[in-house]
Structure formats: structure tokens, C-alpha cells
Amino acid sequence: MSDVYVLEYVRTPRGKGSARGSLHHRSPVDLVAALQQAIVERTGLDPAAVEDVVVGSASQVDEQGANLARTATLLAGWGDGVPGGTINRFCASGIDAVAQTAARIRSGDLTLAVAGGVESVSRVPMFSDRGPLWSDPETVKRVGSIHMGVAADLNATIDGWRREELDAYAVETHTKAAAAWDRGDYARSVVPVPRADGTVFDRDELIRPGTTAATLAALPPAFEELGAAGQDDLAVAAHPEVGAISHLHTVGSSPALADGAALLVLGTEEQAHHQGLRPRARVIASATAAVDPVIMLTAGQTAVEKVIAKAGLTPSDIDVFEFAEAFSALCLRLRRDLGPGPDRLNPAGGTIAMGHAFGATGAIMVGGCADALDRLGGRYGVAAVSGAAGLGVAVLIERVPA
């Protein structure tokens, strides 16, 4: 068994997931290929030494179809001999790409690889693959597949969170994200991207620094109409104990849709030496989890609990929790159950503030965890994402001191 290390991490800024977003003019293949080129420019990595490129994406259709990873690798000029493959575990696709690739290196199957994720929601909309989980009424009924926002409100109802608590968390993450950008916390890893008009896009554009409890209190519930259209009936049929769902999340306490991409270079210590790269963090372990597909969004926390226990650690040992903010309720639940306060849970803000680029988010979480450990001098960090249908993936890393 070989130790596996994070050797480098790069990502794009996250753009609004709409035609008005700063990344809308760039195809998802182009985003990945540009990051591959940036890795070579920043590190001097020899692409010919890379044994696989693994990219997660949640909607693998149209511009994100046809094995995007292989296409991007060819377009990046990495040569014909570098393989590429794609993974789909819904929103956990990017973190699963990292976890699976690290496991292959640990087993000796690989020694140097690139893993990450991409999503261009503005060009390949959510649910556009029209899979049966979204589009077949019989499958939806049998599985109990509900919209993620309604699942979030179901969780909030079960846990008894108040609207004010959900809004307060959203204010907190926007405040932390704006402060982190102002401090330069993201400068090391973000690769600027030219906008369509030739200006430089170099900062996540969804952050609202002036967000306050008062501004969020004025927003209407985001998922009440979906619930009334039949989604609540599906949720209550699976969980009759709730009686009725309280629709409390708004667009302000929900993750905004984003475009973006992220890649990590993973390898053995020997490969790090050969490539002239410094190991930044050791990937200790990963865990996958699955829960009730109606409750859905708790699987990320379950994966966190599994991977911490697998490593023989406790939540108090973890210095940084990078947890994809799949709605405020799930972050409050993790904070209640595992104990991390604002200084340990998403210390530089999260996806409610900076946007959720589905397949890219998990890779951003792992890379952001390594960055945060470097910045804060912590030892252990865990990154995790919850996905549709009750899936979750977590990765545990240990900082390597410089």
C-alpha cells in the first residue's frame, strides 16, 4: 500500500449558473482543459507521466457527455497516451473522482493522476439528462424521488429548525466568504478566466457581502409551490410522522447554481519527487454512504462520520470541515451533531455563498480543505458532499507541513 498525496489543486472562479454568468461562454470541456494547461504552467508537471484523468460531472449529456475527461485531455495537448474517464455520483461526482483515484494510487494501480469535476449548469441544465429518477413518473413514485429543496425543508421540519436559524447560517457563510476573498484566501488556487468581453474573471461572483438577517427575512419560501404541486405528498407518504412540511428555505439559505471546474494532482511521494512537487496533504481515507432517498441530504454527514471513525479519530480531532452547503438545515444538523463551530465548519464560506457547481463542488471541497489546513496550520480535515437519491462521499486528509 502506498501513501497518496495532494500535490496540487486548481479551480476556476464560480460563475452564476445562467446565461448572465461569467463562465457561460466557456464549454465544460474547455474549462477542464484550461485547468489542465494551468497545472502544467504552474508546476512544470510532465503530462506524459499522468496515468489517468478522472472527472466527475452530474449531467453527462450534450456538452458534458461523451467522456468529457478524455476529450479535455486531448484538447489540453497532453498527448494521445493519457487516458481519461468520467464519474457520475450526482453532486458527489467530483469528490468521488478524487476518492476513487486516491484509492487506486493507494492500491498501487496508479502512481500519478489528476482528478476533479466540472459542471456548466448554464449550458447543461439540471435534469437535462432526463434520467428515470427525474422524468419517469413510476420510478419517481416508487423511489420517492423528490426535489432537493423539498428534501431540505423536510429535514428542517424533522429537526425543528426555525426560519431565523436557517437565515442566520446563510448570513454567516456569506460574511465568511466575502472576508476570505478580501484576505486573499483563494488567491493560491483560483485560475483566472477571460470573460467573453475580454475582462478577467477571477472571483466567485455569487457572494452577497451585504447579506443580513433582515434582507433574508424578506424572501419568500423557495419550495412551497413545488411542495403543493405533489412533492409534499411524496415526502409525507415516506415520513408520515412529520404531519406536514414547513417550507422554510429561501433562495438565500439554499446553494445557488454555479458553473465551475476543479482539478487535483494526486500521487505517491516518489512521483512528487520526480515531478518536483511538494506533497501538501496525505489522503488518509474516504467513505461513501447512502440513506433514505427522500431524506436524501443527510448522506454527506453519514459519510463524514464513517470516514472519521475509519481513521480512528473523533470529530474533535478534525480542524477543518469542508461540507457542501446543501441548504442551511443540513449544516446546522452537522454542527449540532459533530460540534464544529464557525471557525472549523467552512471557515472561508461555502456553497450557499459561492455557488454549487454540482460535479465540481466535491473537488473544490477537497482542495479547499487542503488550502484551509495550510492557512490555519491544522492537521486533519474532512471534505464531504451529499447528492441526490441519498448518496454521500467524504474524504479525510492530513496536512503535510512545509
Image: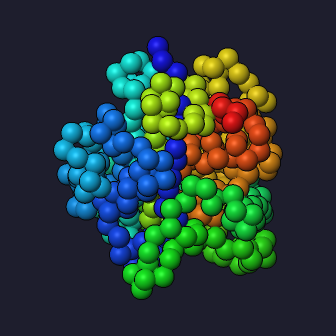
List x then y, in percent, for residue 186. 63, 59
List x then y, in percent, for residue 210. 74, 77
Furthest toward the top, the residue is 1
List x then y, in percent, for residue 264. 47, 44
Can the viewer see residue 401 in this picture?
yes
Above or below 351: residue 47: above
For the point 45% across and 21% down, which residue is it? 106
Can the viewer see residue 159 in this picture?
no
Above or below 350: residue 386: above
Report whether 63 appears left or right of 150.
Answer: left
Report whether 323 appears left or right of 43.
Answer: right
Above or below 167: residue 40: above
For the point 41% across and 50% down, which residue is it? 40
List x then y, in percent, for residue 329. 67, 52
Front residue of this view, candidates 150 and 74: 74
For the point 76% across and 28% down, which residue is it? 317
